[in-house]
């Protein structure tokens, strides 16, 4: 999970971070070779290669240091095809080599390419959890059982994927998943209707895509530079039925904020906690609209804290819909950069101060004169 990768300035990592690095960092593959501290992650649409620089004069056993941090994204399918071909050609080159390491490589690769549908699904679920599916014997048995049977027929569905993206070791997956399923059944939440189809043409550009859609919605609402009073009006302005609000039971994880989907009457619906403040509720409603419009073709989606493409895009959409960056920058007094000004802008657009701070941050130093 990209949000859990320790920064390049961190010299001491936690036990969880160490486990993550061991599983997803290229350097963990071999301590003898000069390999970068590069972690590989997928946000669902793309694959991120996150390369961290080495702190100077720390690794005395290494003949050299990597001095720059970089992060770049590539299309997921292209990365999968490239890695598959890399492993295949490597095994061909080692065909005549007799070594226990080569034997284990062949054994693991044969297990991967010959996996049946059920095993492949289990491996994908384990990968979303950041775990090695071939070391499941070291897991908590209840987690293995949940991945094998707890998700049921929805194991390959989008909501199950969202759930696995935020699941943590201390969570009881069965109780949380059952609550989500009960909510889905109670409010008859399903996929987007065939009569209402909205597709994304440039899904690789997360922020640009979300911002463009948000500006189009604001144009349809004819709000100009004014704040949006009722987020749910955006649903009607874009051609769907009115947005329905429902209550989500308290879950044993703060990472799930709401469930977004469609009713059987063709209305977008958000199920969220009852004790959410008005500003956070507006933001959640905007996120839920984006997910309902563009990400619910296969069924309901979770609104969560995950850093997948869908979740990042929903946050970018909500921020731009409620507090357009251009309007925030225009109102920003460069000579009065104080917390009070952040609060004033947040109150004007009826959003949290965090939304204003992020919009200003994303505008860049040149726009803010900082």
Image (cartoon, rainbow, N blue to C red):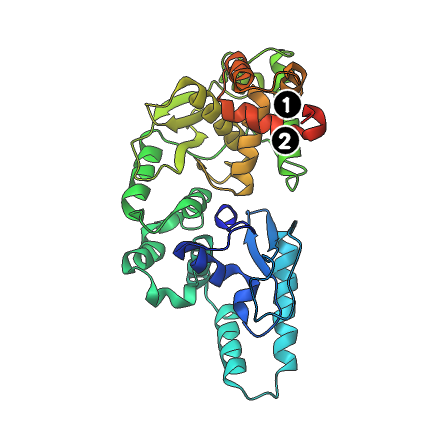
In this rendered view, identify the residue nearer to me: 155 or 250. Answer: 250
| 72 to 91, vertically: above or below | above
Neighbour class for label 2 at 10 Å: few (<14), some, many (≥20)?
A: few
Residue placed most toward the observer, 255 or 230 = 255
- Front residue of 273/111: it is 273
Q: For the residue carrying disc 1, how many other residues have a C-alpha within 10 Å: few (<14), some (14-19), or many (20+)?
A: many
Q: Quadrant of the C terminus?
A: top right
Vertical position of residue 331 compared to residue 302: above or below: above
Q: What residue sits 29% from the left and 47% below the top?
A: 172
**Residue 156, disc:** none
Residue 144 picture location, percent across and down: 33, 59
Q: CB of mark 1 within 8 Å of CB of mark 2? A: yes
Q: Is residue 34 above or below residue 291?
A: below
Q: Position of residue 347 (x, y in %)?
A: 50, 13
Residue 194 visible to the viewer: no
- Give the image quarter of residue 197: top right
Left or right of residue 347: residue 90:
right
Q: Quadrant of residue 361?
A: top right
The residue to which callout 1 is attached is: 325
Dot 1: element: helix
**Circle on res. 362:** 2
Q: Is residue 211 above or below residue 335?
A: below
Residue drawn at 53 percent across, 21 percent down: 240
Q: CA distance from mark 1 to mark 2?
A: 8 Å
Q: x%, y% of residue 295?
A: 53, 36
Please give the name of the residue rendered at 41% of the width and 21% of the height, measured from the top-left corner.
244
Residue at the front extreme, as displayed: 57
């Amino acid at each position: 999970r990209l949000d859990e990768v320790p920064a390049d300035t961190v010299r001491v990592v936690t036990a969880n971070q160490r486990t993550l690095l061991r599983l997803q960092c290229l350097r963990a593959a071999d301590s003898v070779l000069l390999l970068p501290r590069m972690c590989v992650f997928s946000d669902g649409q793309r694959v991120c290669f996150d390369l961290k620089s080495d702190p100077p004069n720390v690794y005395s056993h290494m003949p050299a240091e990597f001095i720059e941090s970089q992060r770049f994204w590539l299309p997921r399918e292209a990365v999968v095809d490239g890695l598959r071909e890399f492993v295949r050609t490597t095994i061909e080159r080692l065909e005549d080599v007799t070594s226990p390491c080569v034997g284990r490589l062949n054994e693991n690769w044969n297990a991967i390419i010959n996996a049946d549908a059920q095993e492949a699904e289990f491996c994908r679920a384990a990968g979303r959890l950041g775990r090695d599916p071939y070391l499941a014997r070291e897991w908590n048995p209840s987690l293995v059982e949940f991945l094998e049977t707890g998700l049921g027929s929805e194991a390959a569905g989008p909501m199950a994927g969202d759930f696995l993206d935020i699941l943590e070791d201390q969570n009881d997956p069965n109780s949380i998943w059952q609550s989500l399923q009960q909510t889905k059944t109670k409010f008859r939440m399903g996929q987007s209707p065939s009569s209402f189809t909205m597709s994304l043409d440039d899904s690789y550009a997360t922020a640009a895509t979300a911002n463009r859609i948000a500006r189009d919605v604001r144009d349809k609402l004819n709000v100009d530079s004014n704040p949006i009073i009722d987020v749910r009006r955006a649903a009607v302005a874009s051609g769907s039925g009115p947005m329905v609000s429902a209550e989500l039971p308290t879950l044993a994880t703060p990472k799930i904020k709401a469930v977004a989907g469609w009713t059987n009457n063709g209305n977008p619906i958000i199920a969220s906690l009852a004790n959410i403040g008005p500003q956070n509720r507006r933001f959640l409603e905007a996120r839920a609209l984006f997910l309902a419009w563009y990400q619910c073709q296969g069924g309901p989606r979770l609104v969560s804290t995950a850093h997948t493409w869908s979740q990042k895009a929903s946050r970018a959409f909500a921020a731009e819909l409620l507090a357009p960056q251009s309007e925030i920058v225009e109102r920003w007094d460069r000579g009065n950069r104080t917390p009070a000004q952040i609060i004033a802008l947040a109150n004007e657009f009826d959003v949290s101060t965090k939304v204003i701070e992020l919009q200003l941050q994303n505008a860049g130093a040149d726009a803010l004169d900082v």
